[in-house]
Structure formats: C-alpha cells, structure tokens
C-alpha cells in the first residue's frame, strides 16, 4: 500500500507495480493542487491521474468520504471514471482539455450553462452515494478555523472576533433545506474540459452532504464574475430570482468568501506541504497574486471585505 510520505521516486516505483496498466508506464508530476499531490501516468494505451491524499483533520478531509464522493460523482456522470482505489491513492481518467478559467465564464453563457448542468446533475444524484460522507456546513468550518488560528497565533488573530460575529449573523439567516451531495470547493480550476469541450468536476477533498447554494456561489465568487454574469448564472440554476433567494445567495456568497479567507489562514499556520510546490501551484492558479498561502489568504480577504461592504445592510 502506498505511503503518502514517500519521495516522488518511490511513489513512481510503487505505481509501476499496480496491475491496472497496459505495459510500461511513465510518470510526471501534475502541478495544481494546494493540499494534495498528483501525477500523470501514461501507459501504452491511456493517460491517467494518480491522486495521492491523506486525512487532513484541520479541514475535515477524510479519504473515506473523499473517495465515496468521487465514486458517486463518477456514477452520476459529472466526474472522471475511477480505475483503482486504495487508502491514500486513486487512479482516475485523465481529462486533456485543461481547467476552466474565470475568463471562460464571464460573458460566455454556453460554458455557464455547462457548469450549471453539471451542478444540477450532482445535486440531484445523492442516491448514488455508497458509504459514509462528511457533512459540510461552512459556518461550522469557519468557527473551527478560527479556533485553530487562535491556537496557532495566526497573524490575523485580532480580526477573529468580528469575523465570528459576521459568520454567526449570516448563519441565522439560512432557511431550512434538504442536504444533497455537494462538491464544496467549486472553484473554476476544479472544472475540467474534455476533448469534446464538455465540463467535468474534479478534486473531491471537501465532497459531502451540504447546501447546493455553496457550490453555485463557489463558481461565481471564485471567478470574480460581474454582477450581470453572476445573476445570469444564478437564473440558469433557479429560474426567476426573488427577494428571498437573493438574500440566501448573498449570505452564501459572504460565507464562501469568509471560508476561503480562513482556509488560507489555516494553511499558513498548519500546512507541511513543500513550500516550492505550493508556490508553483499558486502561481499556476493565480498568477496575479503573491505566491504561497499568504497570497491566497490576502486575495480572499479582499473578496470578503468587498462583498461585506456590498451586502452588510441586508443582515445588520
């Protein structure tokens, strides 16, 4: 069984021993993840992705839930086929078309419709789940992150009381809902194109039962969509919006921004990933931001503060 702490060379040798390949393989690192490690594996017939993950308790990431989410999403038809699994390793189909970028959404209703179609199929497909899933509630996640940041004496510790006040205020405004299978990290780069330009979801670290709005605003907020394009996206999912839907979506936009902000903070004080790899991934994903976790934190702090100024009058 693979040990995630092995060196890349030892991991490559282990991958070569698996019986899911056709002939000899070549292995190359895949840049892009901010809290896991992946490789592209090529055999005589196909290319696959070998994804190596571990439980990360500070983020509520448990590999049993990750793999259950991934398998269900593959059965639903919104995520690549899974060829092989073991405790810390998944081999899955490689998608050749590259990841979705914010510019692929702004002013592009075709791609927005594809994204909405994927999310609706996912949220309607909870009956495909086999095994145990975590429950993702972003308000609880933020409270936990603040406790970790306080214990680790984060540079942002003075901000925490006000952030918790806002977090709890937003939570009080959420209406009762039916939990469904959700991705919970629906940033644009977790949507991939295939060779026919269809769109698929990858990276299920935070997959679990949750609120569908969190996925929808995950797309719009992390793509920094304009108000017009964002509203068009929401209407594609819900149809005609009303005042109550607008209020719920605003609450989830804010908690999404706050969760990403606090996620970066926690990575700053807890991550043991190689800093060069993190910087390379950050540069690939967000070339206009400071490389490393602080750049991610600061980017999402700006997003949160901007949206809080915009929407605070609804909730105060």
Image (spheres, rainbow, N blue to C red):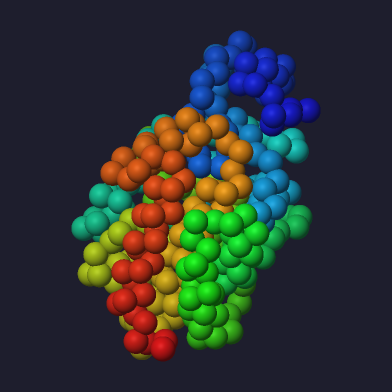
Residue 159 placed where, x, y %? Answer: 47, 68
Residue 209 placed where, x, y %? Answer: 63, 65
Residue 199 appears anywhere in the view = no
Residue for point 61% across, 77% down: 178
Residue for point 40% across, 83% down: 247
Q: Is residue 72 above or below residue 139?
A: above
- How many labels were placed on the picture? 0
Q: Is residue 107 above or below residue 17?
A: below
In front of the other: 103 or 281: 281
Specify the quadrant that holds the C terminus: bottom left
Specify the quadrant that holds the N terminus: top right
Q: Viewed as shown, does residue 245 lie left or right of 277? A: left
Residue for point 62% across, 16% down: 9
Q: Is residue 316 above or below residue 185?
A: below
Residue 230 placed where, x, y %? Answer: 30, 67
Q: Quadrant of residue 297?
A: bottom left
């Amino acid at each position: 069984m693979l040990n995630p702490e092995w060196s890349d060379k030892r991991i490559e040798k282990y991958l070569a021993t698996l019986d899911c390949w056709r002939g000899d393989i070549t292995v190359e690192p895949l840049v892009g993840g901010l809290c896991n490690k992946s490789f592209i594996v090529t055999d005589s017939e196909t290319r696959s992705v070998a994804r190596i993950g571990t439980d990360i308790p500070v983020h509520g990431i448990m590999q049993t839930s990750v793999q259950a989410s991934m398998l269900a999403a593959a059965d639903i038809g919104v995520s690549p086929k899974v060829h092989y699994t073991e405790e810390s390793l998944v081999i899955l189909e490689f998608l050749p078309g590259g990841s979705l970028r914010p510019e692929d959404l702004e002013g592009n209703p075709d791609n927005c419709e594809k994204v909405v179609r994927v999310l609706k199929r996912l949220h309607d497909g909870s009956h495909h789940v086999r095994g145990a899933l975590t429950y993702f509630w972003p308000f609880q996640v933020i409270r936990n992150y603040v406790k970790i940041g306080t214990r680790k004496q984060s540079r942002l510790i003075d901000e925490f009381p006000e952030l918790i006040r806002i977090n709890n205020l937003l939570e009080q405004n959420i209406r009762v809902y039916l939990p469904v299978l959700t991705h919970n990290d629906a940033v644009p780069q977790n949507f991939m194109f295939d060779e026919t330009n269809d769109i698929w979801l990858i990276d299920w670290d935070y997959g679990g039962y949750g609120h569908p709005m969190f996925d929808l605003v995950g797309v719009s907020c992390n793509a920094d969509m304009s108000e017009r394009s964002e509203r068009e996206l929401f209407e594609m999912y819900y149809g005609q919006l009303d005042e109550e839907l607008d209020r719920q979506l605003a609450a989830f936009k804010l908690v999404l921004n706050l969760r990403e902000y606090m996620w970066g903070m926690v990575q700053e004080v807890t991550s043991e990933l190689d800093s060069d790899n993190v910087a390379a991934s950050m540069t690939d994903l967000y070339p206009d931001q400071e490389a490393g976790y602080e750049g991610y934190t600061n980017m999402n702090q700006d997003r949160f503060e901007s949206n809080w100024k915009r929407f605070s009058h609804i909730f105060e």
